[in-house]
Image (cartoon, grey):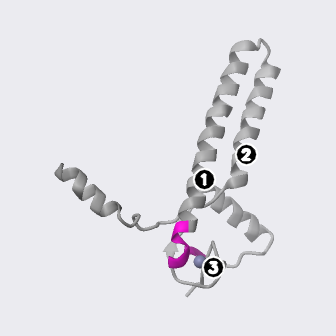
Amino acid sequence: MPKTVCIVCGKEKAGHPVQEDPVLSTIRAAKERLGRATGNSLVVCEDDVEAARGKRARFEKYLMWYGLLAAAMFFLVLYSSRSLASILAGALAAAFLLALSLVNYYPKAELPEKRGEESGKAAGTKA
Ligand SMILES: [Zn+2]
């Protein structure tokens, strides 16, 4: 059985599985190429659920803002430039902005619902 390792504390622990995404599979493929794949499955342990939730929320916020900025910049270049070269430069700059948001990358885990949310929802439907 493969080991499960928590992505927050780095300890070998059971926990909530991390969802596979393009960034994670790229990292895994790169590690396999370098012969440094560990074969561990990534999880978030019970103690670190809140920490992982906060970090993921932060990354999603960054991704959204950088995405908006990149799109705005690309369209600005598209409308103001006359040459193919400057449009390409705009696309490159937009791609660079998106890559910058990955500095804060954090994988998404299948975390349980926030505590207290359940009761709030039930009260909401009653009203
Ligand atoms: Zn942990």
User: Could you tell me which residue is drawn at 81 percent across and 21 percent down?
Assistant: 86
The mark nearer the N terminus, 1 or 2, is 1
**Residue identified by numbered label 3:** 40
Instruction: Mark 2 and ligand 1: say if the CB distance to the nearest ligand atom is below 8 Å.
Output: no
Instruction: Name the image quarter holding residue 18.
Output: bottom right
Looking at the image, residue 89 lies above or below residue 111: above
Q: Is residue 41 magenta?
A: yes
Closer-to-camera residue (56/77): 56
Residue 45 visible in the snapshot: no
Q: Is residue 101 magenta?
A: no
Amino acid type at image mark 1: Arg
Q: Which mark is residue 108?
A: none
User: Could you tell me which residue is drawn at 59 percent across and 41 percent down?
Assistant: 64
Q: Which residues are magenta?
A: 39-50
Q: Which mark is residue 99?
A: 2
Question: Where does the image place residue 109, in percent across and percent down from the top left?
Answer: 52, 65
Q: Residues within 10 Å of mark 2 (few under 14, many from 20)?
A: some
The mark nearer the N terminus, 3 or 1, is 3
Q: Which mark is residue 58?
A: 1
Question: Where does the image place residue 1, in percent across and percent down from the top left?
Answer: 55, 88
Q: Ligand 1 is found in which quarter of the picture? A: bottom right
Mark 1 secondary-structure assignment:
helix
Closer-to-camera residue (32/22): 22
Amino acid type at image mark 2: Ala
Label 1, label 2: how many angstroms apart (C-alpha)? 16 Å
Closer-to-camera residue (34/95): 95
User: Could you tell me which residue is drawn at 53 percent across and 62 percent down?
Assistant: 53
